[in-house]
Image (tube, rainbow, N blue to C red):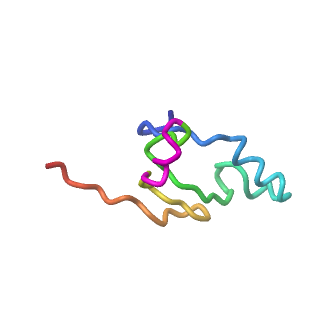
């Protein structure tokens, strides 16, 4: 698990993309100085039924290394 209980990204999934496109110096892994597009989700989508994946609400979206969406914090009742 990553920080705040989020599952870690699969390094193999990410690194293959940069390698295949011959741009592994700027894409493919989460490192300082590299571009990063990814979504942070609160569950491991590989462990839930396929028909429930569409219900996952992203916690955060990062495009080209910049946070473009953060889920609003809801006050507890």
Q: What residue is at 52 percent from the left and 35 percent from the top?
A: 47
Residue extending farthest to the front is 51
Residue appearing at x 51%, y 38% in the figure: 7
Q: Position of residue 68 (x, y in %)?
A: 48, 66
Which residue, as the protein is rendered here, is positioned at the far left?
Answer: 77
Residue at 18% x, 49% y: name it: 76
Percent x, y for residue 28? Answer: 72, 52
Rendered image quadrant of residue 9: top right
Residue 8, image quadrant:
top right
- The answer to whether residue 41 is magenta is no
Q: Is residue 4 above or below residue 20?
A: above
Q: Is residue 59 visible?
A: no
Farthest residue, direction top: 1
Question: Front-most of 57 and 68?
Answer: 57
Residue 49 to residue 60: above or below: above
User: Going by the image, does 37 lie left or right of 43?
Assistant: right
Q: Nearer the viewer, residue 41 or 26?
A: 41
Majority secondary structure of magenta residues = helix
Q: How far across and how far down the image is residue 52, in percent?
A: 46, 47
**Magenta part of the protein: which range?**
47-55
Res. 6 in view: yes
Numbered label tally: 0
User: Can you give x and y, in whole percent of width and height, for residue 72 in the image?
Assistant: 32, 60
Left or right, 4 with respect to 76, comes to: right
Image quarter for residue 27?
bottom right
């Amino acid at each position: 698990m990553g920080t705040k209980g989020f599952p870690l990204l699969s390094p193999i999934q990410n690194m293959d993309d940069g390698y295949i496109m011959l741009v592994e110096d700027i894409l493919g892994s989460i490192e300082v100085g590299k571009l990063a597009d990814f979504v942070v989700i609160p569950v491991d989508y590989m462990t839930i039924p396929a028909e429930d994946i569409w219900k996952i609400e992203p916690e955060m979206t990062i495009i080209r290394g910049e946070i473009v969406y953060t889920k609003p914090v809801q006050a507890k009742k």
